[in-house]
Image: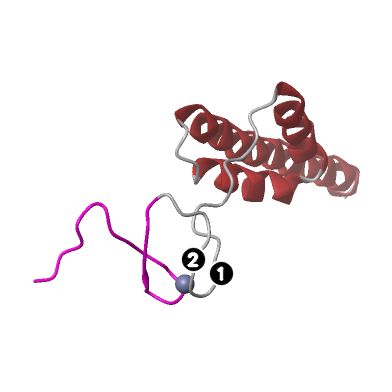
Amino acid sequence: MDEQTPEQTLCPACHVVVRPGDYFCFNCGKNLHPAPPSMAISTLLGFFFGSLVLPPMGIIWGFRYMGSNDVKAKIFGFSLIFLTIADLTVKSYNMINDQIQQQLPNIQGL
Ligand SMILES: [Zn+2]
């Protein structure tokens, strides 16, 4: 059993041993620790409204935040995904409702 010691980190791309603090693999240049997502209020608000305007993006941004080690970023990421799904659910419900409203006169007019 050659279990990794906690100090050893392997590059996910070329599997060379890198130092845990390294941001890039010295061998292949892979980004080992993507920069933590910004927690500035303006950025968070931008993502918040962005996920309402561009629904699928909220899920992508949300997962990026959830991948962070910061608990607040994780919570924000979860909120973005939840918001996006809730928003999509409401929109599709409204769309179905509109369809029913449009079809209703036809059905009643029989
Ligand atoms: Zn590498």
Residue 94 x/y as whole percent: 78, 38
Residue sitting at x 54%, y 32%: 73
Name the residue that disc number 1 marks.
Answer: 29
The amino acid beneath tag 2 is: Cys
Front one among 100 and 22: 22
SS under mark 2: loop
Is 35 displayed left or right of 41 in the figure?
left
Residue sitting at x 42%, y 68%: 12
Is 31 displayed left or right of 11 in the figure?
right
C-alpha distance separating marks 2 and 1: 5 Å
Q: Are marks 2 and 1 in contact (CB under 8 Å)?
A: yes
Question: Magenta stretch mostly in which secondary structure?
Answer: loop
Q: Which residues are magenta?
A: 1-20
Mark 1 burial class by Cα count in 10 Å: few <14, some 14-19, many 20+:
few
Q: Which of the numbered marks, if any, corresponds to residue 25?
A: 2
Q: Is mark 2 within 8 Å of ligand 1?
A: yes
Q: Which of the numbered marks, if any, corresponds to residue 56?
A: none
